Image (tube, helix red, strand yellow):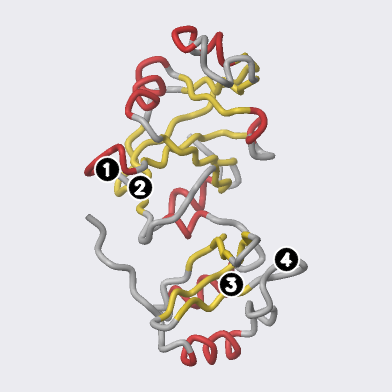
Amino acid sequence: MFHAADRVLVGVLTTPEDFKIARDCGWYRIPTRHAPPSVMDTAVLAFYFTSAFNDEKWAIHWFAEVRGYELMPRRDLLPEQADHPHANDLYYKMQLGPLIHREPPIPSLRWRRITFLESTWDRFNAAEEINDLYISGADGLYVTLKESGFFPEREYLLHDDTMTYTADIAIPCQEGVVAVVLNERPAPDHVLRNHDLGTVLQAITAHGGPLAPQKRS
């Protein structure tokens, strides 16, 4: 049905009402001001459920083929919400085929903020958890750390007093977080710029060893 390199876009669903629109009406909306670069090349749209979905929360359970898209103002998509502050904003209306159940689901092992996540069909098909979906120059380090039982996170947000940064790889540890940034991404001074495996392992040991994800309820 799909090819290995086909673009998969993971969108976030925060309300059951929006899921019903995707399931029963066959469309999903994306504000143009926040749309990821691949939105017009997307072949598959997958849905990440937030806490509003109770037993299915924090995971991807459903996906659908994207059959087209059109640009529309929000007021035309949701006329019953004509007074919404973004009623005049433009949205991509992604036209969907029937929803397909992803078995097993793709969970997020830790709480994390997701907006849109761009991936490919081969990664989506093989993914065991959310971090497996990301594409970056840190793929090799991520796989090595995962296979070694270090529970790495990808595209991990770091905060200091005034700024928010994104690390390519982060390993939550008993005594803080070991973060790795590649290329010229801005980052705090304590973040590792050298992603040599030995350097990362030394930092993990210095921080008390990796912290396994806790069971989520």
Residue type (three-letter) at the residue carrying disc 4: Pro
- Residue type (three-letter) at the residue carrying disc 3: Gly
- Location of residue 20 (image quadrant): top left
Q: Which disc, if any, is residue 59? A: 2
Q: Tell me the SS state at disc 2.
A: strand
| Mark 1–mark 2 CB contact (< 8 Å) | yes
Of the numbered discs 3 and 4, the one sitting upstream in the chain is: 3
Check the image and name the residue furthest to the front: 161
Which amino acid is tagged 2?
Ala
Query: Pointer 2 and pointer 4: residues touching (CB < 8 Å)?
Result: no
Residue that badge 1 annotates: 56
- Residue 161: x and y, percent? 61, 65
Q: Specify whether residue 127 is in view.
A: no
Q: Position of residue 91 (x, y in %)?
A: 61, 22
Residue 56 image position (x, y, % from top left): 27, 43
The residue under label 4 is 186
